[in-house]
Amino acid sequence: MSLPTQQAGSATNRIRGVAGRPGRRARRNAILGQQPLGLLFSAPYVVYILAVLAFPLGYAVYISFHSYFFTAPGVAVDRPFVGFDNYVTILTDPAVLQSFANIGVFLIINVPLTVVLSLVLANALNRVSRLKTFFRVSYYVPYVTASVAVIGVWLFLFQQGGLVNSLLGPLAPNPSWLTNSWLAMPTVALYVTWKQLGFFILLYLASLQNIPEELYESSAIDGANKWSQFWNITVPGVRPASVLVTLLATITGANLFTEPYLLTGGGGPDGASTSPVFLMYQKGILQGHPDVAAALGVVLVIGVLLIALIQKRLVGGKEE
Amino acid sequence: MLNETTPSGATEQAAVPTLAKGRRSQTEKRRSLGIGSFLLLALGAFVFLFPFYYMFIGSLQTSPDTSVAGAFPKPGNLTGSNYANINGSINLLTGLVNSGIFTGGVILCTVVFGLLVGYALAQMHFRGRGVVFGMMLLVQMIPFQLLLIPLYIMIVRNYGLADNYVGIILPFAINSTAVFVFRQYFMQLPSTLFEAARIDGASELRILWQIAIPLVRPAIVTAILLTFIGPWNEFLWPFLVTKEASMQPLAVSLANYISNIAATAANPFGAILAGACVLAAPAVILFIFFQRQFISSDFGSSVKG
């Protein structure tokens, strides 16, 4: 590459430009910027985004409005426009409606539990001096471990004769947690809360650093106790983080696939823990209806956006 | 970190409340932690760590013992045969190698292309920079479930990349969060440094390689850790694109074992837990070893404002 000479040229040019004699380089700078090479540096990333993320996004919407099926590569077939037919199919399917209700149950348990537990633990972790590193690492170990691996041990713990039921003795639910149609989804929600909590604790820890220490000091002088400090300084202080945590927890919930697939053996019992993404896999790939599955994906994303907007209003408070 | 004095220092200061130290002791009062909070943290640590301990103990049991006593190792009930059994059903080494290639490919693409675009976004002036930056932020909002079906059609059906490393890596190739981390670190370097190097006639690639990258080494470690979690633990996508056992990452082959084969094994849980230990160990060891590089300040930029 002849980059060195080129760059040296551009440097002298800039100096000349300052002196008031704009050359060809300077004119090029006006169009492409001072370091047009930046375009080249960004090119791989931009191409990647367009090809692997932006194009499929549009393609998903296209598929959802057409009658689409799998064909061998290169075979041209007619894929007629069918309007909202796929959406009607989705929204009148009781299994789909059940999966949305399941996600609703999941979010009602998972999101508040995640916000409260991660804030309380992050707040305590922020003030502890002994064993701080040990606590921090032990909290994020589940987050960095493969879900497939920890699901193995949860299956072992929560099976009919598992350790959890041994501890509970006569209080053990029958049928057991993951095969009980009332408890399957709450158990999945509990599992995901446990798995993801470490990440949210890290988010809150970062946010806690932004609260000025003086606020605690002056409120202590005014006689505020720890509880009122937590409620009146910490909670409002980490509000931006709370917005982010609720949003990310909701997105994680909407993406649920591995847990219903493995933990409850394919969304069992009797569909009590199916998730929309699991149905997308089942309908789109196993049963060969990608058009219906794409429509389900679009509906799911719109649903998540609506929930996120409502949450932002509720959690974000008055500042907007 | 923020807390330099020990709790004993705090009591000494409280005992001698001069004006200057009085302020300090107020801080210490809030900073010092009640026994209740400490117990809460300890309980939390137990809840988070116990399943991992139980995973390891369970993987060594000859016959699964689900009683409370079974949570403690018993000399008569210990065996390594579960590891041999799971290795007989799914080839652990092949799985680990495939997971490694998948994760390594993603990390390589993220570091190479991410450093380039991160540097360009932070320290170069070019037309369209704002568009690229906006794109990077927006991309992180795109939910993967929406891309699932079109990506499957494109990669598996149209390009025939099923059971191919390229097909597995492609949707994850460049982690936008890592790009964001790179940009943030490059932004913190003084731009005069780069102006001077340019006037001295250094090419942009040379500036990046010899000046910028050596200054942001911690960012590279952080970005590698952040990126590692995704592909090493990913299940759904490699599950969709790999049907041949010889191409499956360990997470996929272990999941197939759990859902299909385990029912026929003599001690299914022992084998599952042995496989789980092998899958979990690299991530757990990596994050314990590099825990300093994975701290809250790296997330700071995303929660400010």
Image: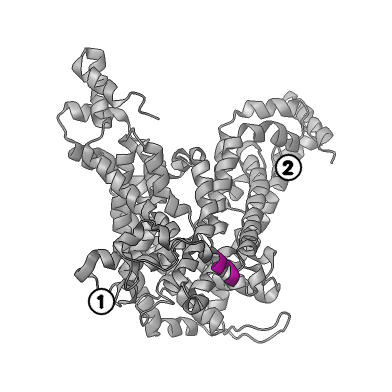
Specify the farthest residue to the front.
B76
Which residue range is magenta in the image?
B84-89
Q: Is residue A62 left or right of residue B29?
A: right
Q: Quadrant of the N terminus of chain A?
A: top right
Residue A37, labelled with which disc? 2
Q: Residue at x 62, y 31 (%)?
A: B215
User: Residue A28 location in percent, x, y?
Assistant: 76, 40
Q: Is residue B282 left or right of residue A269?
A: right
Of the two numbered discs 2 and 1 in the rendering, the one whose residue sits closer to the viewer = 1
Q: Amino acid at mark 1?
A: Asn
**Main structural element of the magenta stretch: helix, strand or loop?**
helix
Residue A203, compared with residue A54, is above or below; it is above
> In the depicted view, which residue is nearer to us: B113 or B292?
B292
- Measure how far apart labels 2 and 1 are at the Cα level: 66 Å
Residue A183, labelled with which disc? none
Tell me the subunit letter for badge 2. A
Q: Residue at x 61, y 56 (%)?
A: B103
Specify the farthest residue to the left.
A223
User: Residue A107 location in percent, x, y?
Assistant: 33, 64
Q: Residues within 10 Å of mark 2 (few under 14, many from 20)?
A: many
Residue A174, labelled with which disc? 1
Residue A286, compared with residue B202, is above or below; it is below
Tell me the subunit letter for badge 1. A
- CB-based contact (under 8 Å), mark 2 and mark 1: no
In this view of the protein, can residue A320 be seen by the observer? no
User: Residue B19 location in percent, x, y?
Assistant: 22, 13
**Membership of B230 in magenta stretch:** no
Q: Amino acid at mark 2?
A: Leu
> In the depicted view, which residue is nearer to us: B257 or B19?
B257
Q: Is residue B299 left or right of residue A128?
A: right
> In the depicted view, which residue is nearer to us: B45 or B189?
B45
Per the image, label 1 sits on a secondary structure element best described as: loop
